[in-house]
Image (cartoon, rainbow, N blue to C red):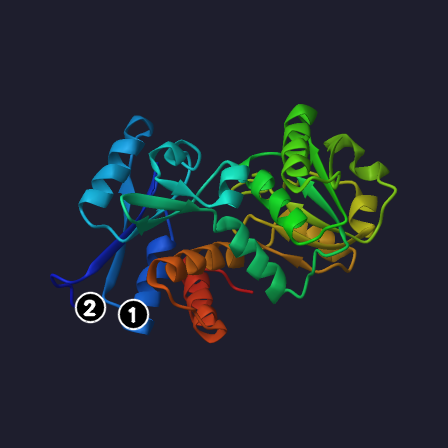
Amino acid sequence: MKTIDGTTRVCGLIGNPVAHSISPLIHNRLAEIRNDNLVYTTFCVDSDRVSEAVKGAYALGILGLNVTVPHKQTVMAALVETDPLAEAIGAVNTLVRTDGGYKGYNTDILGLDRELSDAGLSLAGKTVVLLGAGGAARAIAFLCAKRGAAKIMIMNRTLERAQGIAEAVNNYFNSDTACAKPLTDCGKLGESGYIVIQTTSVGLHPHDDEAPVTDESFYEKAEAGVDIIYNPARTRFMKLMQKHGKPAFNGLKMLLYQGIAAYELWNGCEISRDTAQLIYDDMKQALGIVE
């Protein structure tokens, strides 16, 4: 049994709800494997008390925090500093203790970046199609531009939301890489060989039989697909990709690696690929995922 004493550092997750989170498994297993004197738990925080919670956490000496929905934007007002890329994205999910308060980072994009690397997918010079225009799509669009994607097509039912993301990305990188298209155009794309990243909640359990795009030609012309959903482990989007012989990946490794990136920031360490694999196996077992 882990010993908790007067020198044990505390990290945690703020959001609402948080009881379902698998983040405690990630961080407490990392601490156990590395023999770090650290514990990680969850804190359910109401939307009107986010600033109060962050200030209280700092006063209590909490080493670092993760932030989940619905607080990734509102928490930024309570920080003493924000990483420039996270500032441009407009959302943070990791708070790192610094002088006078917390600094905010977005490790969600670091998580996807490492997942893509594991899968052998490079965005450099590629056309990337993003399905959806929510907070996740915004962060991922910035990652795609940072990694040198030649073209980023943000496809959404509400075109204005996609246009807002495209403008933000192009302004930040001083480019015209990103563009917006209606989701109904998915079957009319002239491009082929694109990487698709599915960022919507369509297909999330228990709606396992749903997909944001069902046009077969869309999947036939794709190179590979990533769904940020991890429950179910094989979404309909992934099945449609695989039906056309294209590799498809779920979002479990993105979740793993965003947590690892946060742990590294808090502890000034580097987690090995072997250790990451151990945690990944634990996550699959906890979620009942059989691949």
Could you say where residue 69 lies in the image, as x and y percent from the top left? 42, 37
Q: Residues within 10 Å of mark 1 (few under 14, many from 20)?
A: some
Secondary structure found at label 1: helix
Query: Can you tell which mark lies on residue 45?
Result: none
Q: Which amino acid type is marked by label 2?
A: Lys
**Residue 200 seen in the figure:** no
Q: Is residue 222 left or right of residue 197?
A: right
- Is the Cβ of the residue at disc 1 closer than 8 Å to that at disc 2? yes
Real-space Cα separation, disc 1 to disc 2, in angstroms: 8 Å
Q: Residue at x 42, y 64 (%)?
A: 285
Q: Position of residue 246 (x, y in %)?
A: 75, 58
Q: Is residue 63 visible?
A: yes
Where is residue 248? Give x, y as percent.
67, 57
> Sequence-wise, which precedes: disc 1 or disc 2?
2
Residue that numbered label 1 is attached to? 32
Please name the residue that numbered disc 2 is placed on.
2
Q: Secondary structure at mark 2?
A: loop
